[in-house]
Image (cartoon, rainbow, N blue to C red):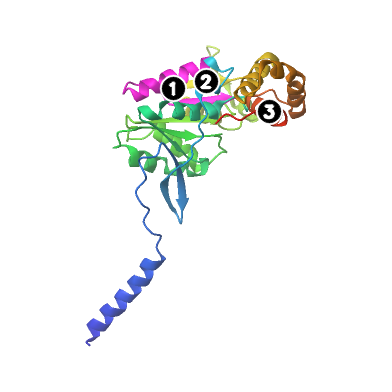
Amino acid sequence: MTDLEKFLARAEAVLARIEGLLPAAHAAPDWSATAFRWRRRQGRGALEAVRYPHRIRLDDLQGVEEQKQRIEQNTRQFIAGYSANNVILTGARGTGKSSLVKGLLHGYADRGLRLIEVDKGDLVDLAEIVELVAARPEKFVVFCDDLSFESGEPGYKAMKSVLDGSIAGMPDNVLIYATSNRRHLMPETMRENLDARHDEDGELHPGETTEEKISLSERFGLWLSFYPFSQDEYLAICGHWLHSFGLDAGKIADARTEALQWALGRGSRSGRVAWQFARDYAGRNAGTMRP
């Protein structure tokens, strides 16, 4: 064996060892699924099908009729191929923001709607996700739940770029729906008020830090705000869920006092608290779960 042959043999052996250390290529996404998660493993991201997506119905969401109507209309436009907006849902916790997005999948999956859930830490891959689905015939909503950023987080700039700040436009089959407890997605400080200035005409101009925070939320075309429920709204939601668990009107009326005590103990009258109370009360009173 010549020196060249020996060198080539050693090089092939080294390459074989290196290939063994590299992460395996991800399989193509299962496009028959209706819901996906973006997951990173060994430094690479991939779409993973969600086998058992949350199947909450839009009709189960009570007390948010206006928000439901507006996001449904936007989604119907999107599915039909008409212009539609990216959506930011902000406000009180437990009022149905995330459930509303999940309910859209249940209601419109048979018309081609698909949902991709992306964690905040993986938003740096947003452009890659958009490129991956751009040529597909389905309509994809990229769902970012409980979204908020601290200063300097890379996901902030990635989101901002995809929404409205890149040379590459958003494909017609992708929208972003995000939920947040913060209207401007980043924490606000008293210092920002000191940075504001007035011009000669008396107009107020926010400081650069505030402008940066507002600039991202303004890239969402549709803003939906959610507010804490009143006592009557909370009780109505409890009644809806108790009825869905098989309790009759008499037992639902008997549950009123306990429902209020449950909310008092949790310090909140939210849809989530109402759902949790109904599960507990129905279970203790032999309510039957809906299939």
Nearer-N-terminus badge (1/3): 1
Magenta-colored stretch includes residue 223:
no
The type of residue carrying mark 3 is Ala
Name the image quarter holding residue 10: bottom left
First of labels 1, 2 by sequence position: 2
Which residue is the site of mark 2?
A: 59
Give the percent coordinates (x, y) of residue 148: 56, 35
Residue 192 at x, y percent in the picture: 61, 28
Residue 165 appears at what percent x and percent y? Answer: 39, 32
The image shows residue 182 at horizontal and vertical percentages of: 58, 28
257 w.r.t. 112: above or below: above
Sequence-wise, the earlier of marks 3 and 2 is: 2
Marks 1 and 2 sit apart, C-alpha to C-alpha, by 25 Å
- Residue found at x 51% / y 44%: 121
Residue furthest top as drawn: 201
> Can you say which quadrant of the picture contains the N terminus?
bottom left
Q: In the depicted view, which residue is nearer to us: 117 or 260?
A: 260
